[in-house]
Image (cartoon, rainbow, N blue to C red):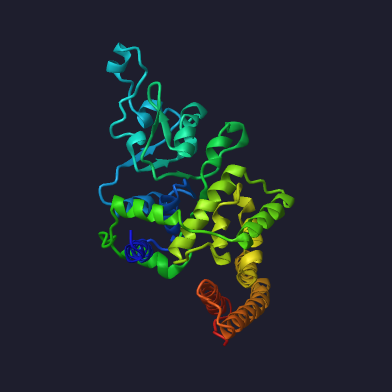
Amino acid sequence: MSKANTNAIREKFLAIEEEMNKYLYERTDPIRGLSLGILSSSNVLLLGPPGTAKSMVVREWTKRILNAQYFEWLITRFSTPEELLGPISFEGLKNDRHMRVTAHKLPEANLAFLDEIFKGNAGILNSLLTIMNERIFFNGPHPQKIPLYTVIGSSNEIPDEEDGLDALYDRFHLKFEVKHIQEDSNFVSMLIKPIPEPEITLTQQDILAAQADIENITSDETIDNKMVEVSRYLRNQGIIVSDRTYKQARQILKAEAWLNGHSEIQEEDIEVLKHVLWHDPDERRKTESTILEMVNPEKNKVITLFDEAFRIANDVASKQGAERQQKAIEVIAKVRKAKQDITKIITDLQRVKRDTKSIEPYLNKLNKMLTDLQLKEIGVIQI
C-alpha cells in the first residue's frame, strides 16, 4: 500500500480518538490504548470502579470498525467454557472428535470484551491463555489461527495471588486505571451532552494494512539501550516484568511510533510503556516516573509538582474552623509556587522549541485548582 494510503489510515485512527475524546471525558489514555491494542495485537485491561464508562469506551471504539466480529460477555463465577468458546458439537462427537460450535463466540471474533474478567474461576479463564497469547484455538485435534485483534478485559481490581490467575493477568499488555470524572465542567458536559453517532469509521482492510505498515517500523541501538536501562532500573526497584511483556512492548512501541507519524521508534514513543510495565496499581506512578525520567524528565518534574499540589489541596478539606483557614493559606502559597515552577519549565522548553502540549494541561488544572481554593477557602482570587 502507498505511503499516502497508510497516512490516510493513520489519520482515521487519530480522528476516531479525537472524536471520542469530545464526549468520553478524561478517557484519553484508554482510548489511545484501544488503538494500540488493535494495531499491535495486544490485550488491554481497564481497571476501575463501576460506572466509569469502561464498557462504553470499548463499545464506542468497536462501533467504528465496519463489519468487525465483536464478542462481549459478562464473566461470573458461574460462567462456563461454552459461554465463551461455544457448545460441544454433537456432529463432532458422532465422529469421536471433541469440537465446539464457535459461531458468534470468541474464537471467531476480531474484538472481544470480557467484562468483570477476574470474577471467573481459574479453570475457564486459563482456557483463554493460548487464545490471548498465540491467537490460537484448539478445536479438535489441530490448532486453528483465529482472527482476533485484541482481548479487552475490565475489572474493579486486579486478581489476588491466591486466585491462580497470574498467567492470565500477564497477558494483558496495556493496563489503564479508569477513574470517575474529576473536572466539574467535564462532569456537567457528561450529564447534558448526548452520545453522537460515529462520523469516522475503519474497515478491516484498513486495520490489516496498518498492521502490515507497522511491521516496517524500525529502531536503533539507542532505543534498545533505553529498554535495557528501563528494565534494569525497574528490577532494582522490585518491579518485575515478564520477558513476554517486554517482547510485546516492542510491538506496542512500533504502533505508538506509527500513530505519531514516525518511521522508526523515537525516545518520545517510549513514554507509552508507562501503561505496560507495571503490575500492581501501587507501582504505576513509580513506573511512570522511571520511564519519564529517562525520556522526558521535564514532564516527570511537572507531574511530580502537580501530584504534590493535588495531595496538599485535598488535605485542606480535612481541617475545620481557624485551622482550616490557616491551612488553606499555606496550601495556596505552595500551589502558587508549583504553578510558577511549572510555568518556568514550559517557558524554558518553548524557548528551545520543545513541544509542551502534553505538559500544558497540568498547568491548566493547577490554575483551576488554585482559583477554586482561593474562592472557596478565602473568598478572593489572588493573581
Name the residue located 41 percent from the left edge and 41 percent from the top edge.
115
- At x 44% / y 67%, what residue is drawn? 261
**Nearest the eye: 364 or 12:** 12
Tell me the quarter of the image containing the C terminus.
bottom right
Residue 113 image offset from top left, x and y in percent: 39, 43
Q: Image quadrant of residue 96?
A: top left
Q: Residue at x 29, y 12 (%)?
A: 94
Query: Viewed as shown, does residue 320 lie left or right of 359?
Result: right
The residue located at (72%, 52%) in the rendering is 237
Query: Which residue extends farthest right?
Result: 236
Visible residue check, residue 66: yes
Toward the viewer: 129 or 251?
251
**Picture coordinates of residue 230, whole percent (x, y):** 66, 56
> What residue occupies the far bottom of the structure in this picture?
383
Q: Is residue 36 above or below residue 269?
A: above
Position of residue 159 relative to residue 303, above or below, is: above
Residue 228, image x and y in percent?
Answer: 67, 54
Residue 338 x %, y %: 64, 77
Q: Nearer the viewer, residue 316 or 1?
A: 1
- Is 353 placed left or right of 23 in the picture? right
The quadrant in which the N terminus is found is bottom left
Q: Is residue 64 above or below residue 96?
A: below
